[in-house]
Image (cartoon, rainbow, N blue to C red):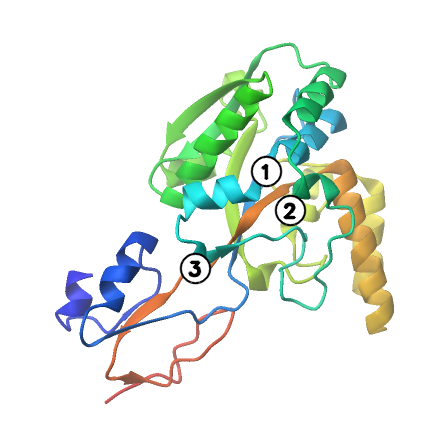
Amino acid sequence: MSALTAGEIDYWENPPQDLVPILADTPGIVTELLDPLGNMGMLRMNHLYPPFDHPAARQAMLWLLDQETYMRAAVGNPDYYDYCYSVFACGSPLETEVGAEPLRQQDVEKARQLFEEAGYDGGPVLVLQSTDIPVLSASALVTAQLLRDAGVNAELVAMDWATLTSRRASQEPPEQGGWNIFHTWSIGADVLDPTWIVLSAGGRERAWFGWPEDERMEELRAAFARETDPEKRAAIAEQVQERAYEIVTHATTGVWFNPVAYRDNISGVIRSPVQFFWNIAKE
């Protein structure tokens, strides 16, 4: 921020939310929202080990989550966050709320019952906490407390993001260096359709960290990739979302928008879900 206000740099792609009001009031600095789709917060569970190897436990997480709680804790300023109950980016052509009922109405008692149905035995559930990324750190704190509210023995495991990205690749049991839950996010442009969303893949060894396995999901994703008719593709996408909420590949904790900050002698800034710089000129 000091370098930007002093004119030593011209553009700051991702200023922290708490500094944006200061920058907005600084002469010579422009703050602006360029990305209409934002960032989707994601909670990923490990499908290999209890309790989340059981679909009832994963369903419990949908009933437990409350996006307002997450966004207030992780972002704070309501001008820069919103709620999204779609697997696909809200504001994108495939946005839908099919199957999203649990996310819209938090029910801690129902979550508790589903954990019991899954055979949860009171053992520790490890929530990886990335302490150097504030939005993810706050999200992990919220998740741990919500789990405790539902009678789950949640344990936070604090580390930096680089360490977390190494640990999430481990398929060892949680107590042997593995994990149960971690938080991440995707930019809206990365979650536009079933072939792009890595978190929806159900190919176990070919799936993303968390390793869900679901033959029906893979059939639907392949069908979407082969289909060329837009209306039929949209219908398949709805089936993908419905299946994603049935097996709970992941859960969305909300969507937030990061303003950029740049000096007012910069022109040619492009509004886009992905930031481009080739059009920028300095006066």
CA neighbours of label 2 inside 10 A, class few (<14), some (14 to 19), many (20+): many
Mark 2 or mark 1, which is nearer the start of the sequence? 1
CA neighbours of label 1 inside 10 A, class few (<14), some (14 to 19), many (20+): many
Q: Which residue is mark 1?
A: 44
1 and 2 marks in contact (CB < 8 Å): yes
Q: Nearer the viewer, residue 26 or 160?
A: 26
Q: Which residue is mark 3?
A: 79
71 vs 226, left or right, is left
Q: Residue at x 69, y 47 (%)?
A: 200
20 vs 66, left or right, is left
Q: Which residue is mark 2?
A: 199
Residue 207 x, y percent position in the rendering: 67, 43
Q: Nearer the viewer, residue 225 or 24?
A: 24
**Residue 102 lies in what quarter of the image?**
top right
Residue 212 x, y percent position in the rendering: 71, 36
112 vs 142, left or right, is right
3 and 2 marks in contact (CB < 8 Å): no
Q: Nearer the viewer, residue 227 or 67?
A: 67
Residue 176 x, y percent position in the rendering: 51, 17
229 vs 163, left or right, is right
Front disc: 3 or 1:
3
